[in-house]
Image (cartoon, rainbow, N blue to C red):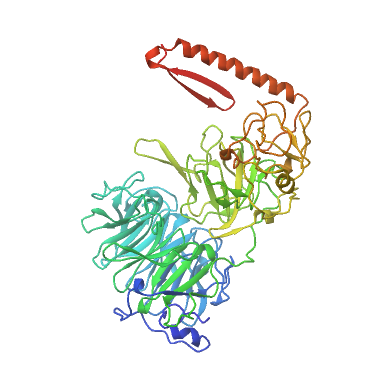
Amino acid sequence: MAAIGLAGAVVAAAWIGLRSKPVVVQPVRAAVDAPPLLDWKPRVAALAGDGHVGWRDGAAAQAQFADPYGVALDPHGTLYVSDGGDNDRIRALRPDGTVATLAGGVEGFQDGQGAAARFDTPSGLALDATGNLYVADTGNHAIRKVTPDGVVTTLAGTGAPGYRDGPGAQAQFDGPMGLAVDGAGRVIVADAYNDRIRAIAPDGQVTTLAGGASPGDADGPGAQARFDTPCAVLVDAQGRIVVADTRNDALRAIDAAGNVTTLVHVAPGDVEKMLHRPVSLARTNEGNLVVGTLAGAVVEVAADATVHAVFGVQEHGFVRPTGLAIGPSSGLIVADSASSRLHAVWPRGASAADPLVEGALGPAPDRPLPDAGGRWPVRPQLAWHEVVGTIGEDRGDGKGESRDHFHDGLDVRGDIGQEVVAIAAGKVSNPLSTYGFGQINEGLSIGSLAYVHMHVGRGAHGAALDPTRFVPVRDEAGKLARMRVRRGARFAVGDVLGSINQMAHVHLWMGVPGYGLNPLALGLRDFRDTVAPSIGASRSATPTTSAWSSARPVGCCCPAASCRWWSTRGTRSTATCRAAVSACTAWRCSGCARTACRWPASSSRARPSSSRACRATSSSRTSMPTRAASPCRATARRTSATRSATRRTRERSTLSRRRRCPPATTRCASSRRTSRATRRCAGAT
């Protein structure tokens, strides 16, 4: 479609039907008669970009962006776009519907005019009253100024991360992300990884308005207040500075005296979490706040602090709406950076036939995959490794529901503490690229690849890796709270990302949220998947012979330590286990995954004579995933017998301890840790 004038005039629904006609651009008006956003149903249309990652100027529909992060709309209808990724350019979507490059083109840190200037991962944008554009040059830790004719100068920052107030040339920032210009001409900076809000005066002096040395969540006078990765700022009609406190899921306000208060905060029990990870801000002509979130939603916050969905809460929305701008008639412009697209949102017509979405959402379906070259995420990268989980398997939620969702990645087995390495070169685009610190799902996203179940930025024994890319974040007590990886950080093939945690595998995921891709398409070296996917009736805890025969692939092993061979013919051999382990890895054993294999109680097959080895299983055991069994040795029986004898010895020892406990306080607790059992008697002297 012709591009909404193509940036300034998001004005009329009739414009859709006039896409082939020339569009007259109207300047942004100070007052409008359109209702607030929350009073109308949205209509979303493509504005510019074809969903592919690339660089191409020209007609809006054919233009390409890499990481269109921030937007700023001038009074004449020109939309400025910061394009990060591998483009590192400032682009302009002009009123005639064409996209042009204003400055930049090669990653670096250099002033100059047009293509001679250099940026590194530009993010937030802001315009002053005279038409100068300010750029949060995130990767260069600096604030840049671009004149209307494309001359780029450095307003503040040295090019190195740090924290220091003072004259602009000596001041330091750490990953500045969001910008705004207040009525006094100050440039307000969301200094994301310093967890502070800073201000650059017209004379170039940099001061800190609020925030402290460590992240937190606290209101109060400026120096006592705490933020956690603030990513966006704006100045409201009352002159307050509104902050998108991204990792705190909150909107905060700083008044003229420097006091910080919370406007809206996600409540602990809020299941919708419409303000989860706010990352972009805009102010409507009616004075309401529009917020974009890293969850893909766009919401509006009214003056009474109520939150209303605009788009992406109930329906499939954007991927990462990192840039917002308000056009005339309260029309909204959205930069969906992860999709490499710009969109326009305005009221739908009265007809029920009017579409909710016109054009494409999300990345282009044929967007090229990362150049993995057949490499694996563990060493050796060009030799095959065991895959213990693949895409499409049903998985539980950990709360008793065994079939909660489908597995959406590849699980590559590795030893606990083994290094996880990058399979493709990439650049971090998400401001919050790490997640789940200290949990089993801890991971890191680099471009369209995610590596999960690892200690990010830490080795097998907690040793820190490269501190220039993995930045430790400590709490007020000095305890390690998480690892940060800055937006703009680059990784090469084979770079160490962390170490495998207690899950004993690395989960490899590909795509962007809401648009996951099949990781089998990466073509891992020598990987073969010979079991065709199928959807069938669910298997109960006590399957019949026919159910087992139709569902269980030939060559599957029970997840017992002493591997026992089960075939679809209902026979088993305990002497040997064939080496077809790969066929077992995606299977869930119907028996309980304990030391010895448990036989289903109601199976029509003859049960073995050993009640110890084959007891009836409970339904709570059926959803436990199998673990890949190593090929059984001929000593399987002897190993099993040895374990049984050891267990009996421990049981006798426990009974002896119980007898020594004082009668009034006898309560014995037992705990099992890895393969070693320990018993302790509470109250024993």
Residue at the limit of the structure toward the bottom, as seen here? 21
Residue 71 in sight from this viewpoint? yes
Write down the quadrant of residue 599 in the picture. top right
- Say which of 200 and 276 sits in front: 276
Residue in the picture at 37% in, 62% down: 179
Residue in the picture at 32% in, 51% down: 165
Q: Is residue 455 above or below residue 139?
A: above
Q: Is residue 116 left or right of residue 268?
A: right
- Say which of 585 and 655 sits in front: 655
Residue in the picture at 51% in, 82% down: 2
Measuring from the top left, give residue 19's x and y in whole percent: 51, 85
Q: Is residue 431 above or below residue 658?
A: below
Q: Is residue 193 left or right of residue 625?
A: left
Total marks in image: 0
Write down the quadrant of residue 613 in the picture. top right
Q: Is residue 242 left or right of residue 145?
A: left
Measuring from the top left, give residue 85's x and y in whole percent: 54, 60
Residue in the picture at 29% in, 73% down: 286
Measuring from the top left, give residue 168's x and y in whole percent: 35, 56
Measuring from the top left, give residue 645's x and y in whole percent: 65, 17
- Say which of 367 and 14 sits in front: 14
Q: Is residue 295 above or below residue 632?
A: below
Quadrant occupied by the C terminus: top left
Residue 149 in sight from this viewpoint? no
